[in-house]
Amino acid sequence: MSEILSPCIKICHKDSNGLCFGCRRTGEEIGKWSKYTDEERKEIIAKTYHRSNVPGETPPGNFLR
């Protein structure tokens, strides 16, 4: 059985709504990732494709260009 890996890309900073700039997961989704089933992980990853960070905000170090 293959495990659905974390979508983390090591840009671990959240916007003012608590959404990670790197993976677009919420703090709760990040914290509970290891407890989710593969099906739940697939659902979370699908949700991240429809999320965006707060307009005008960038992570420290200005990773986004």
Image: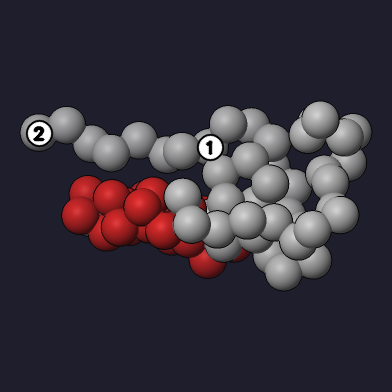
Inspect the image, locate mark 1, and give the three-letter code of the amino acid beneath it.
Cys
* Label 1: element kind: loop
49 above or below 65? below
Report the side of 30 relative to 5 (left or right): right
Q: Which residue is mark 1?
A: 8
* Label 2: element kind: loop
- At a point 53% along the width and 66% down the height, the residue shown is 28
Residue 31, position as x, y percentages in the image = 51, 58
Q: Please identify the residue farthest to the right as the structure is shown.
A: 61
- At a point 23% along the width and 36% down the height, the residue shown is 3
Inspect the image, locate mark 2, and give the three-letter code of the amino acid beneath it.
Met
35 and 65: which one is in front? 65
- At a point 53% along the width and 37% down the height, the residue shown is 8
Q: Which residue is mark 2?
A: 1
Quarter of the picture containing the N terminus is top left
Report the side of 45 relative to 3 (left or right): right
Decide: few, some or many residues near mark 1? Use Cα within 10 Å; few <14, some 14-19, many ≥20.
Answer: some
Identify the image quadrant of residue 16: bottom right
Residue 62, position as x, y percentages in the image = 87, 35
Mark 1 vs mark 2, foreground winner is: 1
Considering only order in the chain, which callout, 2 or 1, is on the residue closer to the N terminus? Answer: 2
Q: How many numbered discs sit on the rendered protein?
A: 2
Query: Can the viewer see residue 31 in this picture?
Result: no
- At a point 28% along the width and 39% down the height, the residue shown is 4
Report if the CB atoms under discs 1 and 2 are less than 8 Å apart: no
- Residues at marks 1 and 2, CA–CA distance in whole angstroms: 21 Å
Indicate the colouring scheme: secondary structure
Residue 14, position as x, y percentages in the image = 73, 55
Of the numbered discs in the image, which one, if any, rests on residue 29? none
Query: Can the viewer see residue 54 in this picture?
Result: yes
Quarter of the picture containing the C terminus is top right
